[in-house]
Amino acid sequence: MQVWQDEVGNICGRYEAAEAGAPALLLGSHLDTVRNAGRYDGMLGVLSAIETVQWLNENQRRLPLAIEVIGFGDEEGTRFGITLLGSRGITGSWPQSWVTHPDGNGITVAQAMADVGLDSDRIASAARRVEDIVGYLELHIEQGPCLEQEDLALGVVTAINGARRLNCRFTGEAGHAGTVPMTHRKDALAAAAEWMVFIEQTTREQDPQLVATVGTINCAPGAVNVIPGEVSLSLDVRGPLDNPLETLLSSLLTQAEAIALRRGLRFESNEYYRIGATACDSALQQALSHAVETVQGRSLSLPSGAGHDAIAIAERWPVGMLFVRNHRGISHHPAESVAVADVAPRACRLIYRRSR
């Protein structure tokens, strides 16, 4: 391959087509990790793409399309708290404000880039022309247990879930735990608990692909002998289609208001994060499903609950994703584990069929 590092720090390699100058099929994933990470989240997709090119080269095969392998930089956002820096670089959708964004030690993105020989003034030069790329395929570990439960090595991703994140608060009235009768209480924690049960039950009933999580909760004043007067809690709602996601969120917030009204409390919420669902290309899904059926007998289609570089790439080009079985679905943890037999015999055949 012809190999280079682009202006935003991605590592790229091109395996030329049968006729030089043909557009490319882009293969890859990200090279960065979260803290205390596993070995496969991101890197497996890059290494599998390199192995695919090696197989093609060893068998002296050139395709109608060039194959470009890319290892994206900073998909996770661990250092700076902003995500998809590498993939937004090649799509030309890098916000200018990112260059001044600091890490926990006050070092800006621009300074960090300079430390490794990159010039933040040249980020725009990383953008690729739309006509130079025909699509993007990403192999990634499944960050969940579905493939393992189905005893399948591979699955085809339908969409990357959209997400909404909110900070919520129930405000009641603190009081003495021994002197205020149960019928006179305005217990914020009891209201929050009732709502949390409703969130779990309603989300289960509406759609098996929708998920909702209360991940943090803070109770004040937080004393054993005081009725809770205020409870702050987070809400994270995700799903592969935006309309059902909005419907679920609306019903959850409506119920929170009803609980607060019935109990004589106040409820408020603030949405601080929103990202739309990203659908994988239907033609690529069909082609990948056919290939997966060929190599393992049947194909399973499933959404991704986690974000990927494909979110950014889908703004410019068709994207397709394959999931690989990951033991117990554990991810962002050293216990990530894939079987060689699930990866090695399949990746090259899948890519070769698609590229033809």
Image: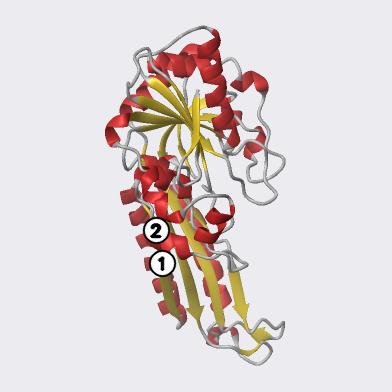
| Residue at (47% x, 50% y) in the render | 85
Residues 184 and 41: in front is 41
Q: Given the current orientation, which residue lies at the most extreme top position? A: 59
308 relative position to 355: left or right: right
Q: Which mark is residue 274?
A: 2
Task: Name which residue type carries label 2.
Answer: Arg
Judge left or right: residue 117 versus residue 280.
Answer: right
- Residue 109: tell me if it is visible: yes
The spot of residue 224 in percent (x, y) is 72, 82
For label 2, the crowd category at 10 Å Cα-Cα, with few meaning under 14, some 14 to 19 and many 20 or more, is some
In this rendering, the answer to whether 279 lies above or below 352 is below
Say which quarter of the image contains residue 132.
top left
The label on residue 271 is: 1
| Residue at x 54%, y 74% (from the top left corner) | 232
Tag 2 near tag 1, CB within 8 Å: yes
Q: Single out the residue that lies furthest toward the left.
A: 131
Tell me the kind of residue under disc 1.
Glu
The x, y position of residue 27, in whole percent, is 46, 29
Examine the rendering and report whether any part of residue 202 can be seen. Answer: no
Mark 1 neighbour class, 10 Å CA radius: few under 14, some 14 to 19, many 20 or more: few
Position of the C terminus, as image quadrant, is: top left
Pick the front one: 342 or 54: 54
Rendering coords of residue 197 (x, y %): 53, 61
Q: Is residue 349 above or below residue 108?
A: above
Label disc, if present, on residue 222 of the rendered structure: none
